[in-house]
Image (cartoon, rainbow, N blue to C red):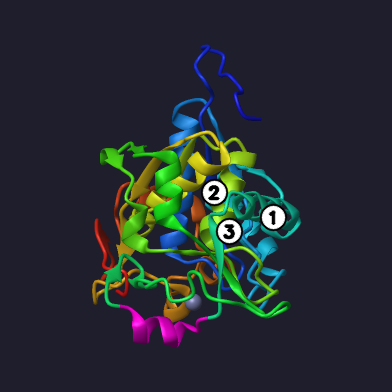
Amino acid sequence: MAGTRSPYGTPMIVTRFAPSPNGSLHLGHAFSAIVAHDLAKERGGRCLLRIEDIDGVRSRPELAAEFRADLAWLGLEWEEVPAQSARVAAYEGAAERLRAMGLLYPCRCTRQAVRDEATAKGPDGPVYPGTCKGAAFAPGETVAWRLDVAGALRRTGPLTWPDERAGEQPARPELHGDVVLVRKDAETPASYHLAVTLDDAADGVTLVTRGIDLFSATHVHRLLQALLGLPVPTWHHHPLLLDENGAKLAKRRGSAGRGFGLADRRKAGEDGRVLAAALRAHRFPAGITLGESLSADS
Ligand SMILES: [Zn+2]
């Protein structure tokens, strides 16, 4: 798939929509899917659907079928690629390579310990202060594995990444500190950073479209691409649908249950293509606006 060419000889654009089946989709997901779909179609490319289902605790497999029905209802076309749960061996292989480079180290800290010990705040909250770097571990102890970001940057040198909307960006993974790449719970083996970077490369994604709340995560993803010898796509971080409080629509705040849920609207007989046209024209229901930037905890 990677390197496929369009009829015009330029590399074919490949985008993706990658929802997690831990709750029903809402208008914010519809907007994101439309952005991915339209950017591909406008340029003669392909749009992929990837189900991000490695959160073994919260994933509900039956939601994947609901997502497909929602996207079809919106009038979108896509090609589905394997779900994350089919890719665990690739995540483990990449972690092993990073371990062999001496760039992963074990960590036993709880979230609470990280909050207590952190002295800096990063884009996603408290920055891990490196407590376990060089610490001794008993064989068989359950640990997470963190990326030694300083060591990684010594290896790669300075990096940049291209964003279609924001321009060329200097990669600053150090803002996040030593992020977890392999999680402690066996139910969810890879962190979002590792899984999504490997998946996009494996799927030949050339334009990563996603919400602007993930803008700073790209610093980490660019570093992982350099370490693992993966192709560098272009990114397109789109604005997000915000509610009347300025918070992004989110599954955990029950946005799907407040009249913003796609499956409910579909089952109530609404015309999904009309809804998609409204979202394309930035015509939103009362109280919903588009926002360009968010703090990590909003
Ligand atoms: Zn630790």
Measured in 3D between alpha carbons, the distance from the residue under mark 1 to the one under mark 3, in whole angstroms, is 18 Å
Q: Secondary structure at mark 3?
A: helix
Q: In this figure, which residue is indicated by the disc labeled 2? A: 197
Classify mark 2: helix, strand or loop.
helix
The amino acid sitting under disc 1 is Ala
Picture coordinates of residue 112, whole percent (x, y)? 43, 87
Front in this rendered view, residue 161 or 152: 152
Residue at left 49%, top 16%? 10
115 in the magenta segment? yes
Q: Quadrant of residue 164?
A: top left
Provide the residue designation for mark 3.
Answer: 70
Q: Position of residue 268 (x, y in %)?
A: 54, 70
Dot 1 or dot 3: first in sequence order is 3
- Relative to residue 221, is residue 51 depicted above or below? below
Tell me where residue 254 sits by quadrant.
bottom left
Mark 1: few/some/many CA within 10 Å (<14, 14-19, 20+): some
Binning the other alpha carbons within 10 Å of mark 2 as few (below 14), some (14 to 19) or many (20 upward) gives many
Residue at left offset 56%, top offset 55%: 194
| Dot in front, 1 or 3 | 1
Q: Which residues are magenta?
A: 109-118
- The percent position of residue 219, horizontal first and vertical second, equals 38, 50
- Judged by depth in the image, the label closer to the viewer, 3 or 2, is 2
Front position among marks 1 and 2: 2
- Point out residue 62 in the picture as x, y percentages from the top left corner: 71, 69
Mark 3 to mark 2 CA distance (whole Å): 26 Å
Along the polypeptide, which appears first: circle 3 or circle 2?
3
266 or 69, nearer to the observer: 69
The answer to which of 77 and 110 lies nearer the viewer is: 110
Instruction: Please tell me the numbered disc located at residue 83.
Output: 1
On the question of residue 275 being in view, the answer is no
Dot 1 falls on a residue whose secondary structure is: loop
